[in-house]
């Protein structure tokens, strides 16, 4: 992209990107001040989804969250997944908002509709529409993924304890952090991949671009996950606490392991496709 195209692209998208950034920043600020009552819009559906997956009932405990007293397990505000909403929405919006301007070509190729029959929609309206869609989809994805994470956090510790794995270095707190990092990061990579395939199909692109490197496939989810989970706390001087350093190393180790497995899966898929 030459300088003229870059300037035009920034001019067309700068205000839209700023609007998206301010909305996500506002969500981050409100989440930091929110209590259980103000988060029932996400805690309630999450608790119902966990019940459907596990058969374990949860009741609302005012000021605390959704609790199962028999298991002594609480779905608290810190378990709401709002941070994952912000990460997912940022990834979807900033990674694909430029693609919505290609809808005429995509619709025409995908549905064989003459271009003159497609209505002209202002780019700003398309961008704002995609911002709203990103937030809504992130909300749905968060309920789905967070429910799976919570079920794993319920069932895995007793299994690890019975097998003798839990104890010593692997404390319940570290295991909880590892489960969250693995589930959330793997889900983020999957969502990004599915969104990319959807836009490729919509725009009439190839099913899978061989030139797309593994690094390029992972760059956006890696950036947004690490920026929001570790970068923002680091800028807020959380690094002064020794617990943050341990948390950052543990998250990086888990995400690195997921990336290795993800890269191997892509390489294996390419190998099978070339052989076929």
Image: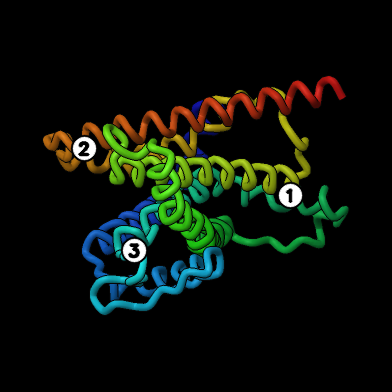
Q: Quadrant of residue 169?
A: top left
Nearer the observer, 118 or 208: 208
How many residues crowd around disc 2 within 10 Å: few (fewer than 14), some, or many (20 or more)? some
Percent position of residue 255, x then y: 43, 33
Residue for point 53% across, 56% down: 127
* Quadrant including the N terminus: top right
Disc nearest the viewer among 1 and 2: 2
Up the image or down, 72 lies above or below 266; here it is below
Element on which disc 1 rests: helix
Numbered mark located on residue 73 in the image: 3
| Residue tagged 2 | 244
Is residue 124 visible in the rendered image? The answer is no
Nearer the observer, 112 or 6: 112
Q: Quadrant of residue 33?
A: bottom left
Left or right of residue 70, residue 139 in this image: right
| Residue tagged 1 | 202
Percent position of residue 78, x then y: 30, 58
């Amino acid at each position: 992209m030459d300088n003229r195209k870059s300037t035009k692209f920034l001019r067309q998208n700068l205000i839209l990107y700023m609007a998206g950034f301010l909305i996500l920043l506002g969500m981050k600020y409100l989440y930091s001040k929110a209590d259980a009552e103000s988060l029932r819009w996400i805690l309630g559906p999450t608790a119902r989804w966990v019940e459907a997956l596990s058969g374990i009932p949860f009741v609302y405990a005012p000021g605390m969250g959704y609790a199962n007293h028999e298991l002594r397990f609480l779905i608290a505000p810190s378990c709401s997944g709002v941070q994952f909403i912000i990460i997912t929405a940022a990834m979807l919006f900033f990674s694909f908002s430029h693609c919505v301007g290609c809808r005429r070509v995509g619709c025409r190729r995908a549905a064989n509709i003459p271009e003159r029959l497609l209505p002209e929609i202002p780019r700003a309206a398309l961008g704002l529409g995609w911002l709203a869609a990103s937030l809504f989809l992130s909300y749905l994805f968060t309920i789905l993924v967070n429910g799976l994470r919570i079920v794993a956090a319920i069932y895995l510790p007793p299994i690890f304890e019975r097998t003798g794995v839990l104890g010593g270095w692997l404390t319940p707190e570290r295991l909880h952090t590892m489960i969250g990092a693995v589930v959330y990061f793997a889900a983020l990579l999957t969502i990004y991949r599915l969104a990319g395939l959807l836009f490729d199909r919509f725009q009439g692109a190839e099913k899978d671009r061989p030139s797309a490197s593994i690094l390029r496939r992972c760059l956006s989810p890696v950036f947004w996950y690490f920026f929001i989970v570790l970068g923002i706390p680091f800028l807020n001087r959380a690094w002064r606490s020794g617990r943050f350093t341990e948390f950052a190393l543990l998250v990086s180790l888990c995400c690195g392991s997921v990336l290795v497995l993800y890269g191997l899966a892509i390489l294996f898929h390419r190998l099978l496709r070339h052989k076929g």
